[in-house]
């Protein structure tokens, strides 16, 4: 009977942890740090570690609730992951310098999709869109 309770508690605690909402702000800061580490990597091992962390964090971001333009946000995250995978492949096949363009594309995508989530300005709040 004790074993049953132990398994039950273990299962219910893992379900509650798995369904915990993502703190998107903290996750995005960690994603930015992993991106920076990938850009600044001096060898392929450092790069792979950082880019794998980056991809994992972006995957976690996809589970967040987006209130404004959710379809476009998820599409943007998928594009970022595709560029990160491309950067990883290029770096492993041709060296770190080959990853520069896909990493630059990630930064451009970040700028584009962050515009979707900027808070409204004073006049937008006052007069609407």
Image (tube, rainbow, N blue to C red):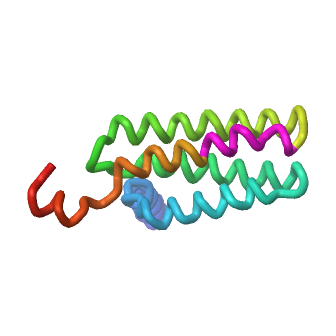
Q: Is residue 4 visible?
A: no
Image height check: is 111 above or below 69?
A: below
Image height check: is 86 above or below 20?
A: above
Range drawn in magenta: 96-106
- Position in image of residue 77 (x %, y %): 49, 41
Magenta-drawn stretch, dominant element (helix, strand or loop):
helix
Image height check: is 78 above or below 37?
A: above
Image position of 67 (left or right of 100): left
Q: Nearer the viewer, residue 123 or 78?
A: 123
Q: Nearer the viewer, residue 124 or 43?
A: 124
Residue 124 forms part of the magenta stretch: no
- Position in image of residue 90 (x %, y %): 81, 34
> Image point 80% across, 52% down: which residue?
47
Image height check: is 109 above or below 93?
A: below
> Image point 47% across, 61% down: which residue?
10
Which quarter of the picture shows residue 4?
A: bottom left
Image position of 54 (left or right of 123): right
Q: Is residue 78 visible?
A: yes
Image position of 25 (left or right of 103): left
Which quarter of the picture shows residue 127?
A: bottom left
């Amino acid at each position: 009977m004790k074993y049953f309770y132990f398994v039950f508690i273990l299962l219910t605690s893992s379900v509650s942890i798995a369904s915990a909402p993502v703190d998107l702000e903290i996750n995005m800061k960690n994603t930015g740090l992993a991106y920076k580490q990938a850009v600044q990597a001096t060898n392929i091992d450092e790069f792979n570690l950082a880019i794998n962390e980056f991809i994992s964090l972006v995957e976690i971001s996809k589970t967040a609730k987006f209130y404004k333009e959710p379809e476009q946000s998820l599409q943007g995250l998928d594009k970022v992951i595709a560029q990160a995978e491309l950067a990883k492949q290029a770096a492993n096949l041709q060296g770190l310098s080959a990853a520069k363009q896909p990493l630059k594309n990630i930064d451009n995508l970040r700028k584009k999709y962050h515009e979707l989530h900027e808070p409204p300005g004073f006049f937008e709040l006052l007069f609407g869109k």
